[in-house]
Image (spheres, rainbow, N blue to C red):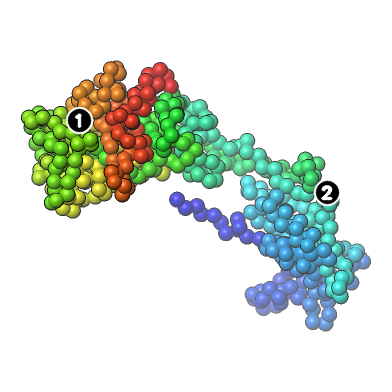
Amino acid sequence: MSDNNDDDDNDYNAHHGRTASGHGSGTGSSRSRRRLLPVAVALVVLAGGGTAAWSLLGGDDGKPDARTAAVDGFLDAWARGDADRAGAHTDRPAAASARLTKLAEDLPARKVSLVRGAPTDQGGHRFRATFRLPGGGTWAYDSSAPVVRADGRWVVRWSPAVLHPRLTEGSELALRPDTGNRGELRAADGSPLDGLAPALVGSPGKSGLQYRYDKRLAGRPADSVAIVGTSTGRTLATLHTAEGRRGEPVRTTLDPAVQRAAEGALKGLDKNAAVVAVRPSTGEILAAADNPPTGANRSLRGRYAAGSDFKVITAAALIGKGVRGDTPVPCPRYERVNGQRFENQDLFALPAGSTFREGFARSCNTGIIGLRDRLDDDSLSEAAGWFGIGPEWNAGTTTYDGSVPRTTGENDKAAAMIGQGRVEASPLVMASVAATVKDGTFRQPVLVPDAAGKRAKATAPLPAGTAAELRSLMRAVVTEGSGEALRGLPGEPGAKTGTAEFGTDSPPRTHAWFIGYQGDLAFSVLIEDGGSGGADAGPVAAEFLEAVAAGG
C-alpha cells in the first residue's frame, strides 16, 4: 500500500516580502530579487513617516545591509529546519539551536513559512510566522528578531521571545493534539473494537486497520497550540485551537461474541497460534484472533504449509476423477515415489480393504499419494481454483490468499497432495476452504464490506455432487477419525485435521491444523510448532465452538 502526500506537507519555506522589479520577465535569480527588496520596503516606511527606514537602506549596489542579512539568514535556516545554521546567526548559537530543535519536536508542523516584515526601531525586523499543523489547520502570529553587534558582525539577539513574544526561559510552545475526533473501528453490531483483535486492529498511523484506514478514521484533529512550563509541562496559556472534523467510522464484519470465543480458546497457549471464523453463507469474517494478541497478524496474513487440511482440496480433485468414499484405497505405512519415502504420522497403517473414506477420516498420507496417477500436473491447482485460491482477494484488509502452483513431476505432486512442498495457505484461506465445503460455493472472505471492492470469484464452481461428497468425508473425520475432539457437539460438525512439517530438523517439526464447520460457521485453528492437528489443535477448536454456543 502506498500513500501519496503533497510535497508541501514536508516542505519548510521562508519568504521575505519580495516584490517584482518591473524589469524583464520576472524570472531572475532569487539573489537579484532580494537586492530589490530593501528599496521597495524602505519607500513604504518613508512614506508613512517611519523612523527606522535608515536600517534598510543598503549600499550603492542595492544589497541589503548586514542587519537585514542577519535576520534573513536566521529566518531562512529556521524555515528549512536547520537549527544549527539558524543558531549560528544569533549571539547565543547553542541556546538558539537547542530551542529550535525542541520546537520542531514539540510543534511538528507540516510546513513553516516565515515572512520578514517592517523594521524595528532597534534595527531588527518584525516577521510573520505561519505553521501548518499536522491536522491541516494553520496558526499564524507576529514576532520580531532584534539584532546586535557581536564578534565584529551583526547577528540576531537571541531570547525565547524571538520564537514567540510570550515565551520566556521557563516556557515553550507545544502542540496539544486532540484525538477525540478520531472515528471508531466497529464490529458488525456497531460496537467499538476496543480491546478486540489487537493484531488486526493495529495502532493509528502504524499498523493494521488503524493504519490502512487512517485518513478515513482521523478526520481533522482539533489541535491546539499552547505555552507550557518547560520543567512541568503544565499548560500556561492556549494560543490557538484549530477547528476539527470528526473522522468517519469503519465497520467490520467481526462478531464480538465469536471474536471473544476465538480469543478465549487461545488463552493459555505458549505457542504462536491463530483462530479464524467465517460465515459460509456470506463470506463474512466473524473472528480473527492471534496469539500473542499483540503480535503478528497470523490469522489473515500468515503463510504456512497447509498440511493434511489440504487433503480437502486433493479429495475434490480425486472426486472429479471418479473416486468416492467407498472406493477401496490401501493405506500402508510407507509409499515410495522415485525413491522418496512418504509415511503416515506415527507410522500407522489401515487394514486391507480400507476405503477412501476411512483413509480420509484417519488422515492417511500414503493412501492419498497412492492415487497420484489419477491426477495430472494441473489437477491440484485447478481444484484449488474451485475454492478461490489463485485470484487476488479484496477483503478490505491485507490477506495472504494461498498458493497452489502447478506441480512439476511425481514427487512434487505427491508432496502437494498432502499439503507439503510448495503449497501454502493462511488460517483465513483454510477457514474459507471449510466454508466452501459447507455452503457448496466459494464466497470470498470479507472484513470491511464497503471498502472491499469487487470480490474474487472461484475460477470455476465446484463440480456437481462434490460438495456433498466432501461433507460426508469431513463428517467421518469427526465420527470415526482424527477429529474426535468435536465428537458429541451438536449440529453435526465436519472437520479435517492437519499436521504440516516444516524446517530441516530430523524428525521434522510440525504445525498443528484443524479446520471445520458447524451450522453457518466455518473455522480454522493453527498452532505453530504445535504438534498434532487432532491431539493439539482439536481441543482448541472444541473449546472455541463451545464458547460460541455459550455466547462468547
Q: Residue at x 91, y 64 (%)?
A: 121
- Using the image, determine if residue 210 lies above or below residue 551: below
Judging depth in this view, the residue of 343 and 420 nearest the camera is 343
The residue that label 2 is drawn on is: 170
- Using the image, determine if residue 183 lies above or below residue 412: above
The answer to whether residue 132 is seen in the rendering is: no
Judging depth in this view, the residue of 204 and 488 nearest the camera is 488
Which is closer to the viewer, label 2 or label 1?
Answer: 1
Amino acid marked by disc 2 = Gly
Q: Residue at x 21, y 26 (%)?
A: 481
Instruction: Report x, y in % for residue 30.
Output: 68, 73
**Disc 2 + disc 1, Cβ < 8 Å:** no
- Using the image, determine if residue 522 lies above or below residue 295: above
Q: Which mark is residue 33?
A: none
Instruction: Report x, y in % for residue 399.
Output: 38, 43
The residue that label 1 is drawn on is: 362
| Separation (CA) of disc 2 from disc 1 | 76 Å
Amino acid marked by disc 1 = Arg
Quadrant, the C terminus? top left
Instruction: Report x, y in % for residue 113.
Output: 70, 59
Mark 2 / mark 1, whichever is N-terminal: 2
Q: Secondary structure at mark 2?
A: loop
Q: Residue at x 35, y 33 (%)?
A: 525
Q: In screen coordinates, is 545 left or right of 383?
A: right
